[in-house]
Amino acid sequence: MIELARARNIYDRLEVAEITRWLTENRDNFDLIAACDCLIYFGDLRQVVIPGAKRLAPGGVLTFTIERGDRYPFRLTDTGRYTHHAQHVREVANEAGLRVARLDEAYLRMEYGEEVTGLFVALKNEG
């Protein structure tokens, strides 16, 4: 993926790193952090959202997609991915000092011939 991104030659900077470590050690601030269909590999979203919130500039937005789950707070599925309950998202956002700007439910992708319902999340730093 990184080689494909480099080939497009449209990014200011590309880095390969473990996300929680990078967010914790990095000191840059961002207007937007987007994580599409990758937080499904984390159970407790605090691992990414709290350090991500610290990297947001005032007015910045952290956006991500996850699989919607009915079991609170999250559940590991037979695919090796996690589903997340919407209340978990709200609680983590609150702990991180972010406002839930959007929390929408919609089609995410197909898996085993079935539609996967996801949560499309936008958390805003009001600071």
Image: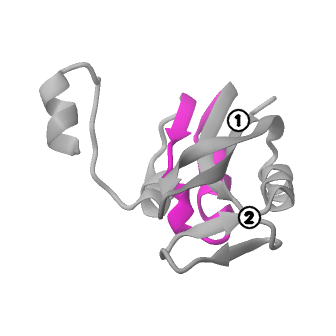
In the image, farthest residue toward the top: 10
Residue behind mark 1:
122
The Cα atoms of the two marked residues, 2 and 1, are separated by 18 Å
Q: Secondary structure at mark 1?
A: strand
Q: Which mark is residue 69?
A: 2
**Label 1 neighbour load within 10 Å: few <14, some 14-19, many 20+:** many
Q: Visible in this render: residue 32?
A: yes
Q: Is residue 90 magenta?
A: no
Three-letter code, disc 1: Ala
- Tell me the magenta residue range: 31-57
- Quarter that holds the C terminus: top right
Residue 4 in the figure: left or right of residue 106 = left
Taking the spot 48% from the left edge, 74% from the top edge, the residue there is 79
Q: Residues within 10 Å of mark 2 (few under 14, many from 20)?
A: some
SS of the residue under disc 2: loop
Q: State which quadrant residue 86 falls in.
A: bottom right
Q: How many marks?
A: 2
In the image, residue 77 sits, relative to residue 118, either above or below, namely: below
**Left-right relation of 47 to 23:** right
Instruction: Please report the residue visible at 63 percent of the width from the left and 72 percent of the height from the top.
Output: 43
Q: Is residue 54 visible?
A: no
| Amino acid at circle 2 | Gly
Query: What's the coloring here?
Result: one colour
